[in-house]
Image (cartoon, grey):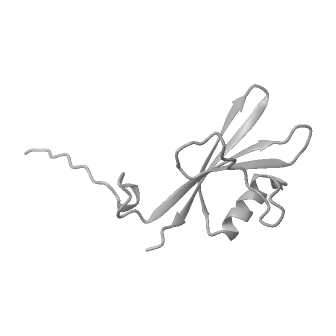
Amino acid sequence: MTTTATFAQTEDTKSNGENAKFVYCEMVGTRKFLSTKVTIVLDFGEAKNIWKDNRVKDEITGKVQSFNSMVDALNYMGEQGWEFAQAYVVTVGQQNVYHWLLKKKKDE
C-alpha cells in the first residue's frame, strides 16, 4: 500500500486572477474622535499612493461619509454588490480597528 498526497487550488484563489470568480476588498473601520460614528477606508489591493484618499465619500458632496456602525457600512457596500466574507479586529492603543473582508462576483 502507498499513500499519495495531492494538492489542488480552487478557481477563486488562483494568484494570477485569470480564472478567479471573485474580486476582494478590505473595509477598514475606525470610530471618529468623540463620536459613535465610523469612518471607512476601502482597500482594493491597489498600489498605495499617499496622495489618494480611500475613505468612502458622499457621491454628491465629495465629503467623507460617516456610518452609524460597521453593519451600516456593510449594508452600504451590499447595495454596491459586495458580500461579507470575513472579519477581524485589531486593537491599536485604546482604539479598535475593524477589518472586514468583502467579495464581489467578477464580471465575466
Q: Residue at x 71, y 31 (%)?
A: 91
Q: Quadrant of the N terminus?
A: top left
Q: Position of residue 55 (x, y in %)?
A: 72, 50
Q: Nearer the viewer, residue 51 or 85?
A: 51
Lateral position of residue 74 relative to residue 3, left or right: right
Q: Position of residue 11 (x, y in %)?
A: 35, 61
Q: Quadrant of the C terminus?
A: bottom left
Q: Nearer the viewer, residue 74 or 54?
A: 54
Q: Is residue 69 above or below residue 96?
A: below
Q: Residue at x 86, y 48 (%)?
A: 37
- Picture quadrant where residue 33 is located: top right
Q: Residue at x 67, y 66 (%)?
A: 78
Q: Nearer the viewer, residue 20 or 87?
A: 20
The number of callouts visible is 0
Q: Position of residue 95 (x, y in %)?
A: 78, 32
Query: Outermost residue toward the left?
Result: 1
Q: Residue at x 66, y 47 (%)?
A: 52
Query: Outermost residue toward the top?
Result: 93
Lateral position of residue 19 relative to residue 68, left or right: left
Lateral position of residue 82 relative to residue 92, left or right: left
Q: Nearer the viewer, residue 11 or 58?
A: 58
Q: Position of residue 17 (x, y in %)?
A: 38, 58
- Picture quadrant where residue 88 is located: top right
